[in-house]
Amino acid sequence: MNLVVCPFHDWKKCEKEGFRTRDAHLILEFEKNPLVEKILVVDRPISIPEMILKKGWWRTKEGKIIYKSQGICLTQISEKIFVLDLFSLDILMPLILRKKWWYYIFNQPFVIKAIKFAIGYLQFNNFILFLWNPISSGVIGKLDDKLLVFDAIDNLLAHPELNYAKKEIDQGYRMIKKEADLIFTVSESLKSFFESSRDDVYCIPNGVDVDFFYSFTEMAQDIKNIAHPIIGYAGKIQDRIDVELMGFLSTCLPDVNFVFIGQVINRKTIKLLLQYENVHYLGDKHYSLLPQYLSCFDICIIPHKVSELTSSMNPLKIYEYLAAGRPVVTTNIAGVDVFRDIITIAKTKEEFLNGIERYIQAINQGNDISGKLMKSITPDHYWSTKANKMVDLIIQKMEKKCKL
């Protein structure tokens, strides 16, 4: 099969930050599957304002350019993976629309024409269109794909940072519910969101590449001078972090250092966290460095609010924490219950505090449970297993559709 994918996080972003997101991991695993012939990754078109604000370039830097014209660049990354980058001369609309730019730009005729050109250039036949973002739904019904697949990472309607784009997000979800041949979701909550009379919605939780967390040799430099015990968080820093909980923990544990790494989405959140002397923010880190930082964390935490948004998620970081052999304390969010026998799931701030204190005591007594934690990540949790299951379900759907 050939795949035309519109990822949530484009290839340029992955080049810069590392392939750390669900869509990035799955694309790399699809590449390894012998049933997948070629993959065309369609990056979101880039405009001049975004290039200036984010200090980036409009096309990928790695790979071999196999076609380039005005505002169009087709790059071969590997034997199987190709990336289509598009440049837009639009100046005002990206600034006005912000994230709604996705919905606007993927409805533009020149974008559809460019995608069709790339599909023809690569000689894709009977290809599958695979989407991750509901507001890239403008491509639906315009590319002559044989099958439409959607993978829901979380419920964007519940995302507080995207309230201004709810209309476009809702329109995208409605179109996907109507037109998609197959839907994957990261959580059971999201599965219920998409299910009605259809029976082709499958919950496939996140995964992990365990070998990746055994492959580092050096310690992260900027954490060396922070005293242990170190309680760490690796992930996006946004509204879902329970700042009140973190204030309680940092006050109750003045001799403990809390270290955050990850992309800042909500500046107010990080500002509130850093008012405490024992809370440290070390910046966003390339994914290749994550094992180094996790190895320095004595305990890992997921201090997320329990909300409609977090009930639709499946925290990727819990798989990474456990693959690195780190004890985990988390709030009672969706997706963590599967590991309830080996992690601490706190329903109150006091339970969260007690969980951290128990792990610190165990560490001080020399009790090493890292091996047990690593063993909790079985082949069922590997990204390769998740991707291969998706491919198998796509093939079954294709076969079923051809018989109709």
Image (spheres, helix red, strand yellow):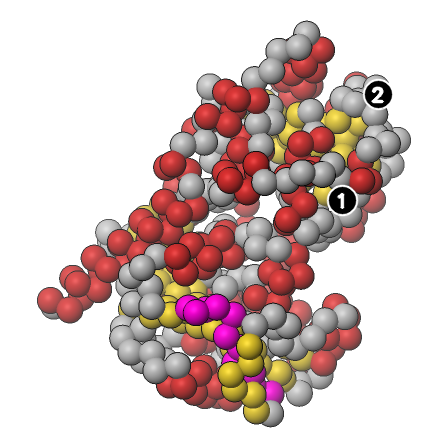
Q: Residue 15 in the image: x percent, y percent?
A: 62, 62
Q: Which is in the foreground here, disc 2 or disc 1?
A: 2
What residue range appears in magenta? 71-81
Tell me: residue 364, above or below residue 152. above
Q: Is residue 273 visible?
A: no
- State the residue at coordinates (72%, 81%): 48
Q: Residue 337 in the image: x percent, y percent?
A: 46, 28
Position of residue 32 in the picture relative to residue 250 (left or right):
left
Most extreme residue toward the front is 217
Q: Mark 1 points at which residue?
A: 269
Q: Does the magenta stretch include residue 77?
A: yes
The answer for how far apart the CA atoms under marks 2 and 1 are is: 20 Å
Q: Does the magenta stretch include residue 169?
A: no
Amino acid type, label 2: Pro
Q: How crowded is mark 2: few (under 14 residues within 10 Å), some or many (20 or more)?
A: few
- State the residue at coordinates (49%, 43%): 209
Q: Mark 2 points at which residue?
A: 254
Q: Can residue 232 be seen in this view?
A: yes
Most extreme residue toward the top is 365
Position of residue 349 in the picture relative to residue 10 (left or right):
right
